[in-house]
């Protein structure tokens, strides 16, 4: 009997993991068994990195070492992808199948810390600056989020740091999403950690995974201009477009990250929260009317956009901000993959032309 084919591998179990499991129906997300609501505001992102990678909240992502990137352009996602691959060469990182688990953990820590700095420096170039913030100023930041802001803007507004920290924690890990799967596939070949992380960055540059916040702010602006969220939603869906920030491959209940980020947006006094809630209500009602068979709820990226806006993150920077948070999940999965040591090699079912000869006589 022919094996069943599932486009997008939906429902296929490709790995076993101890890192995180989105609880599809309960609307809860746990990192190594800990509900993320217990982490936000209690531990900074770098300690959550330690929880995910080392299963230890007392461990943490290291501080970045001095590093001079070459050729940053100000396009953060592509700068990050290129520079992460380049770091592996400049640091002469070993292949995952030839180095110890401890060495891989060290490589991942160095890379993760540096990747945040690359995004901050690239964002600074995009803002039109040609100078760099001195290392001793950056080092004054007490958390990774503060150091990120200092390296980017030379100052770390507390509200912006809190918004970024919450966003990073909420989006640090989420099971076998497209970019994490990519990281694991590359790791399974025995590549070095830089190659695996760089490939993962490329996998989240599209709008269907990690890029949606970039579309949410312009969408809210449009809705605010029309002043009629219900009509805007109907017109958008009638024209065959999707509403960014709604729907999820895994969750059928409310995405717990969306709930936390909405609360954060309210607490930090986002000027967008009112219009965001109006559009959310209109979108949920209309999506339910059109898809009663399929719950389409608010996903993490909708309120991520609002929280990132509190820190004045320009929409094009959203995928790179997502990469900064996901370095924790990617690193944990690369280590887990290294320990299984099994190369990914699924099958493809051939459905192309039947055998034919190029020398056969024309009919
Ligand atoms: N707006 C409008 N309709 C949507 C929708 C959205 N955000 N998300 C799903 N749908 C509709 C689809 O049009 C489709 O309808 P159809 O069966 O009549 O063609 C149906 O719901 C199922 O869509 P499908 O693409 O199979 O769902 P999925 O579970 O594979 O997709 C997403 C998950 C996230 C890719 C999808 O919901 C989406 O594109 N959302 C918008 C982008 C986004 O927010 N991405 C961030 C994800 S965290």
Image (cartoon, rainbow, N blue to C red):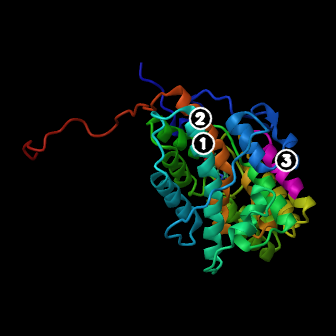
Residue 77 percent coordinates (x, y): 57, 62
Indicate the secondary structure of the residue bearing disc 3. loop
Neighbours of disc 2 within 10 Å: few (<14), some (14-19), many (20+): few
Q: Residue at horizontal 65%, vertical 56%?
A: 64
Disc 3 versus disc 2: distance between alpha carbons?
28 Å
Q: Give coordinates of residue 221: x percent, y percent.
A: 76, 73
Quarter assignment of residue 310: bottom right
Q: Position of residue 139 (x, y in %)?
A: 74, 62
Q: Is residue 194 visible?
A: yes
The number of discs equals 3
Q: Residue at x 69, y 67 (%)?
A: 135
The answer as to whether callout 2 falls within 8 Å of ligand 1 is: no
For image coordinates 74% across by 38% down, the residue present is 51
Q: Is residue 211 visible?
A: no
Is 43 situated above or below 278? above
The numbered dot on residue 106 is: 1
Give the structural element (helix, strand or loop) at label 1: helix
The residue nearer to you, when weighing 100 against 276, is 100
The residue tagged 3 is: 40
Q: Are marks 1 and 2 in contact (CB under 8 Å)?
A: yes
Rounded to the nearest angstrom, the CA distance separating label 1 from label 2 is 6 Å
Q: Is residue 283 left or right of residue 124?
A: right
Camera-side residue: 215 or 81? Answer: 81
Q: Say whether residue 260 is magenta.
A: yes
Looking at the magenta stretch, what is its main secondary structure?
A: helix
Range shown magenta: 252-264
Quadrant assignment for the N terminus = top left
């Amino acid at each position: 009997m022919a094996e069943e084919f599932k486009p997008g591998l939906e429902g296929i179990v490709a790995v076993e993991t101890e890192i995180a499991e989105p609880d599809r129906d309960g609307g809860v997300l746990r990192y190594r068994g800990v509900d993320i609501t217990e982490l936000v505001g209690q531990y900074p992102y770098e300690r959550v990195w330690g929880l995910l990678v080392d299963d230890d909240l007392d461990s943490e992502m290291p501080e970045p070492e001095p590093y001079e990137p070459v050729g940053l352009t100000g396009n953060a996602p592509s700068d990050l992808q290129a520079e992460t691959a380049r770091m592996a060469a400049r640091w002469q990182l070993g292949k995952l199948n030839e180095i110890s688990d401890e060495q891989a953990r060290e490589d991942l820590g160095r890379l993760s810390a540096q990747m945040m700095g690359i995004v901050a420096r690239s964002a600074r170039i995009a803002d039109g600056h040609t100078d760099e913030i001195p290392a001793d100023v950056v080092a004054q930041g007490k958390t990774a989020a503060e150091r990120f802001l200092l390296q980017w803007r030379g100052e770390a507004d507390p509200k912006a740091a809190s918004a970024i920290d919450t966003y990073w924690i909420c989006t640090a890990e989420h099971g076998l999403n497209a970019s994490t799967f990519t990281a694991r596939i590359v790791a399974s070949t025995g590549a070095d950690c830089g190659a695996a992380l760089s490939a993962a960055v490329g996998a989240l540059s599209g709008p269907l995974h990690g890029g949606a916040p970039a579309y949410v702010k312009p969408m809210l602006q449009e809705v605010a201009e029309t002043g009629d969220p219900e009509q805007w939603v109907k017109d958008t869906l009638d024209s065959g477009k999707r509403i960014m920030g709604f729907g999820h491959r895994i969750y059928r209940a409310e995405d717990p990250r969306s709930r936390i980020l909405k609360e954060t947006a309210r607490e930090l006094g986002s000027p967008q929260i009112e219009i965001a809630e109006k559009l959310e209500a209109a979108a949920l009602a209309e999506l339910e009317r059109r898809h009663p068979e399929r719950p389409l709820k608010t996903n993490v990226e909708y309120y991520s956009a609002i929280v990132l806006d509190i820190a004045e993150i320009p929409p094009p920077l959203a995928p790179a901000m997502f990469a900064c948070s996901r370095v924790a999940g990617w690193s944990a999965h690369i280590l887990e993959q290294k320990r299984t040591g099994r190369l990914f090699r699924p099958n493809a079912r051939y459905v192309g032309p039947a055998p034919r000869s190029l020398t056969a006589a024309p009919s």
